[in-house]
């Protein structure tokens, strides 16, 4: 199912676990685009290693590369994760996948090898995006003395920048508006742990499709389409549904906000910071405490990085909003 974005607007009244002094819950993600110089020249074959000292992850800007028909770049990370890029891939997105570690090896190959017929290619790395991160600042919104979140394996969501994003169809994702407008280097990582997803579980954003509003509590949402995976060619909802075993199980259904708080609970699942396994997927359920005209309040534990998480109505079994702010009080 492909969802029309213009049908989402009335469904995305932002929800929040907010107090009078509510804070947005974006994790502190340190990343930078650094200049890098590599140019293979016009050739049919080339091999190089691209590295940046002490970087926990690395991503290549290939926007100046030109690949002939049938030529391909094979990029392999320190952990043996790999990605194959063709001219068609570069035409839709000019960045590589994100690879854990400080270096990647890159091989340019052409049909028939160096001596075969065909046009030459040019492999250029003009910049590298790296994650030179300091320790996460934990924007706590823990309701009580202890962090009661537990590990989770929900296939319908992923880590995106310093936030959480989630699927509502084969290719449409949701996040909080204050998480920022995605760029061509943005990837949503469908992973449960703390590291980067394998290239086959990373998806680039169709940037022109993105719409969002950063209007504060009650008006804070973003939605856009994700491109097919550069390794598998699959849309994210299709691939994630294969993981959970049935058509459509790889994305969330949307539903109405309950008419009363009584007997209703909210689950927040996402990639919040934590003292243990920070930015891994965790979940917690707590009471729905307030229903206002444009936002609701609830008491599941959340921290920085949970911005964008689905606000999931536990009894109804569907998402009713976007988690945007924290700041726990007696009423959520």
Image (cartoon, rainbow, N blue to C red):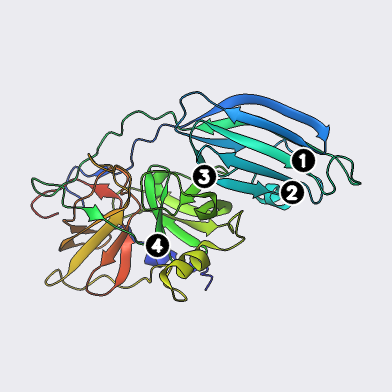
Residue 74 occupies quadrant: top right
Q: Earlier in the sequence, mark 3 or mark 4?
A: 4
Residue pointed to by mark 4: 155
Few, some or many residues within 10 Å of mark 1 (<14, 14–19, 20+): some
Are the two marked residues, 2 and 3, in contact with CB atoms closer than 8 angstroms? Answer: no
Query: According to the image, label 3 marks what residue?
Result: 186
Q: CA distance from mark 3 to mark 1?
A: 21 Å
Kindly state the secondary structure of the residue where label 1 is placed: loop
Which residue lies at the image location 83% right of the left edge and 44% below the top edge?
113
Question: Of marks 4 and 2, which one's residue comes earlier in the chain?
Answer: 2
The tag on residue 66 is 1
| Pointer 2 residue | 87
Compare marks 4 and 1 and give the one earlier in the sequence: 1
Is 200 or 107 nearer to us in this picture? 107
Q: Where 101 sits versus 250, above or below?
A: above
The percent position of residue 314, horizontal first and vertical second, equals 23, 69
Residues under labels 2 and 1: Cα distance?
7 Å
Q: Which of the marked residues, 3 or 1, is nearer the chain's N terminus? A: 1
Which is more N-terminal, label 3 or label 2?
2
Q: Nearer the viewer, residue 262 or 268?
A: 268
């Amino acid at each position: 199912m492909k969802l029309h974005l213009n049908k989402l607007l009335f469904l995305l009244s932002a929800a929040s676990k907010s107090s009078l002094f509510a804070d947005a819950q974006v994790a502190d993600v340190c990343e930078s685009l650094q200049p890098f110089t590599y140019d293979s020249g016009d050739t049919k074959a080339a091999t190089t290693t691209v590295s940046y000292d002490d970087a926990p992850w690395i991503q290549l800007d290939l926007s100046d590369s030109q690949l002939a028909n049938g030529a391909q770049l094979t990029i392999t990370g320190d952990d043996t994760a790999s990605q194959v890029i063709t001219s068609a891939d570069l035409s839709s997105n000019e960045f590589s996948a994100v690879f854990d570690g400080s270096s990647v090896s890159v091989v340019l190959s052409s049909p028939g090898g160096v001596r075969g017929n065909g046009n030459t290619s040019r492999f250029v790395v003009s910049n590298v995006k790296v994650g030179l991160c300091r320790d996460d600042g934990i924007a706590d919104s823990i309701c009580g003395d202890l962090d009661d979140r537990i590990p989770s394996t929900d296939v319908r969501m992923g880590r995106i920048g310093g936030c959480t994003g989630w699927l509502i169809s084969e290719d449409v994702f949701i996040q909080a508006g204050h998480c920022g407008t995605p760029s061509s280097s943005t990837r949503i990582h469908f992973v449960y742990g703390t590291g980067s997803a394998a290239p086959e579980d990373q998806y680039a954003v169709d940037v022109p499709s993105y719409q969002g509003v950063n209007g504060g509590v009650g008006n804070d949402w973003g939605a856009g389409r994700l491109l097919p995976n550069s390794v598998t060619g699959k849309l994210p909802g299709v691939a994630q549904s294969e993981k959970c075993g049935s058509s459509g199980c790889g994305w969330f259904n949307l539903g109405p906000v309950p008419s009363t708080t009584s007997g209703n609970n909210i689950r927040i699942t996402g990639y919040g910071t934590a003292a243990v396994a920070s930015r891994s997927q965790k979940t917690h359920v707590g009471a729905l405490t307030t229903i206002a005209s444009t936002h609701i309040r609830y008491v599941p534990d959340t921290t920085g990085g949970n911005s964008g998480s689905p606000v999931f109505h536990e009894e109804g079994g569907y998402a009713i909003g976007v988690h945007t702010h924290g700041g726990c009080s007696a009423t959520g």
